[in-house]
Amino acid sequence: MTGGPGPNRGDDFSLARLALFSLGAAVAALAVATVVIVVLEPSPGVGLAIGLAGVVTAIAAMGVVSKRMTRKAFGDPEDGSRS
């Protein structure tokens, strides 16, 4: 998985590292949602809404982390650095 010449060759890209970092971001988001539920002790409906918001935030965090890591390793395809 190496790219062309230049600073963004992809030599430092690791799929395992990508998985660990993206899952770590998701776990952090879910931990925050859990702490909010435990601290606030909301009604069941509000607790469910907070939990669902935590899941959505976890998915978004995984997407942001994986996109940033792959763009850092391989470059942004929108700026023409890779073809």
Image (cartoon, helix red, strand yellow):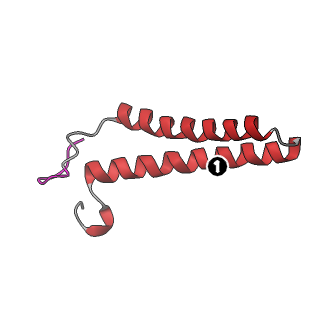
Residue at the spot 81% in from the left edge and 38% down from the top edge: 41
Residue at the spot 75% in from the left edge and 34% down from the top edge: 38
Q: On the picture, is 66 further left or further right than 6?
A: right
- Which residue sits furthest left? 5
Vertical order, 54 against 34 (above or below): below
Magenta stretch: dominant secondary structure: loop
SS of the residue at dot 1?
helix
Residue at the spot 73% in from the left edge and 42% down from the top edge: 51
Vertical order, 64 against 38 (above or below): below
Vertical order, 61 against 23 (above or below): below
Q: Position of residue 4 (x, y in %)?
A: 15, 52
- Which residue sits furthest front? 39
Whether residue 52 appears in magenta in the rendering, the answer is no
- Which residue sits furthest bottom? 79
Residue on which the image places disc 1:
56
Position of the C terminus, as image quadrant, is bottom left
Residue at the spot 61% in from the left edge and 35% down from the top edge: 31
Instruction: Estimate how packed mark 1 is, as few (under 14), some (14 to 19) or many (20 or more) residues with alpha carbons within 10 Å.
Output: some
Q: On the picture, is 38 further left or further right than 3?
A: right
Q: Amino acid at mark 1?
A: Val
Q: Position of residue 25 (x, y in %)?
A: 50, 40
How many numbered tags mark residues here?
A: 1
Whether residue 2 appears in magenta in the rendering, the answer is yes
Quadrant in which residue 81 is drawn: bottom left
Q: On the picture, is 44 further left or further right than 82?
A: right
Vertical order, 81 against 30 (above or below): below
Q: Position of residue 59 (x, y in %)?
A: 58, 46
Position of the N terminus, as image quadrant, is top left
The foreground one among 2 and 70 is 70
What's the magenta region?
1-8
